[in-house]
Image (cartoon, helix red, strand yellow):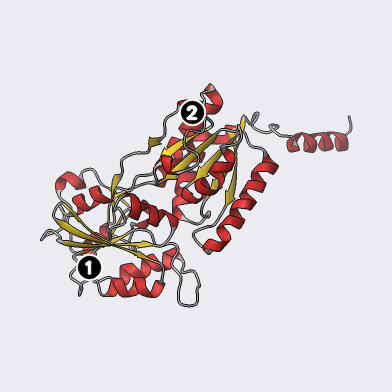
Amino acid sequence: MGVLTRVICLAICLLLPGATNGQVKHRVLVIESYHAEYPWDASYKEGLQSELGSDYQLDFFEMDTKRLARERHLQRANAAWEHYQQTKPDLVILGDDNAIRFLGPLLAQNSVPVVYLGLNNNPRDYSIYGAPNITGVLERPLIKRSIASASQFFTPHPKRILLLLDSGQTSETIYKEIFNDQPNNTFLKISVDVRLVGSWERWQKLVKQSKKQGYDLLFVGLFHTLRNHQNQHIPAQEVLQWTSTHTPIPPLGLWDFAVGKDKTIGGLVLYGKEQGITAAWIARQILEQGVSPGKIHPVPAEKGRYLFSRSQLEKWNTKLPDFIETKAQWVD
């Protein structure tokens, strides 16, 4: 065999599926409700990739529903469905509520196994409930526990807390599931006011006036769907940095991506990576052990971790009690 022939044969072999570094076992399509730059997505994808490794071929489709207006969500869902039909994966992972809401009912009518993650609502509220080919990971924001823990490292103890959420689907679900659609709540004798905000200008106003309105702490919830008066999407990082700079009261976070030097102090937060790890564990049971998804009950991921920014604690002249500091992780 001549040199040219050997080179051609080698090139063909390299292009064949499974020809490099062993045979690819399974093809998994991950349909993201949001986008790759969104820290939550990046975090759970890291968890998926760390657990599934090179034995799995992961394909990602971004619906981008944090940045796109709601009237375009169905269009993106249709594009995701077309992508699924073209790629014919061995298993589908649905990331977060919008992917589950739009694609779940369609996939429930098929036999391909489906694992969802980041589900904030009750599974019974979706058309996927009871589908034999679908199971997944629940996301349960730690809002009440986060508020309880925050009250322990501020002196005097906070009496009034403002929680800001954007107007996205996840925020609306949290408002319904945790707060029963009530804007004014009381936890552990602490008054907690919840505001769903779609306007960037209103968000800024609420932050700036928070101290004058009598609030002691600001919980920065979700902030990824805000739009200005020209209907332009405001990048999440810009919202977070502006809020950190201009808030007159200490800001705390509920998710790991909101903690940092130019972000929030931190607190008891959820990690997207744990959602990905748990979803990957379920996927392995289905694809490697042959377990039917219907036999796997939906599970919550871990119960949260203490994550803090030293620079933010110093900025707000706050010291953690020993029993929290010994368990805390740090971003700086």
Residue 197 drawn at (x, y percent): 37, 66
Q: Is residue 327 above or below residue 18?
A: below
- The quarter of the picture where the C terminus appears is bottom left
Amino acid type assigned to the residue bearing label 1 in the image: Ile
Quarter where residue 319 is shown:
bottom left
Residue 88 drawn at (x, y percent): 67, 38
The residue under the point 20% across, 47% down is 325
In the picture, the disc for residue 294 is 2
Q: How many marks?
A: 2
In the picture, the disc for residue 282 is none
The answer to whether any part of residue 80 appears in the image is yes
Sort mark 1 into few (<14), some (14-19) or many (20+) by Cα contacts within 10 Å: many
Residue 162 drawn at (x, y percent): 25, 63
Specify whether 326 is left or right of 264.
left
The answer to whether any part of residue 29 appears in the image is no
Q: Nearer the viewer, mark 2 or mark 1?
A: 2
The residue under the point 62% across, 29% down is 25
Q: Give the mark, 2 or 1, whose residue is nearer the N terminus.
A: 1
Specify whether 221 is left or right of 31.
left
- The quarter of the picture where the N terminus appears is top right
Amino acid type assigned to the residue bearing label 2 in the image: Gly
Q: Is residue 208 above or below residue 267?
A: below
Report helix, strand or loop for mark 1: loop
Looking at the picture, tell me which residue is in the foreground, 117 or 153.
117
* Residue under numbered circle 1: 249
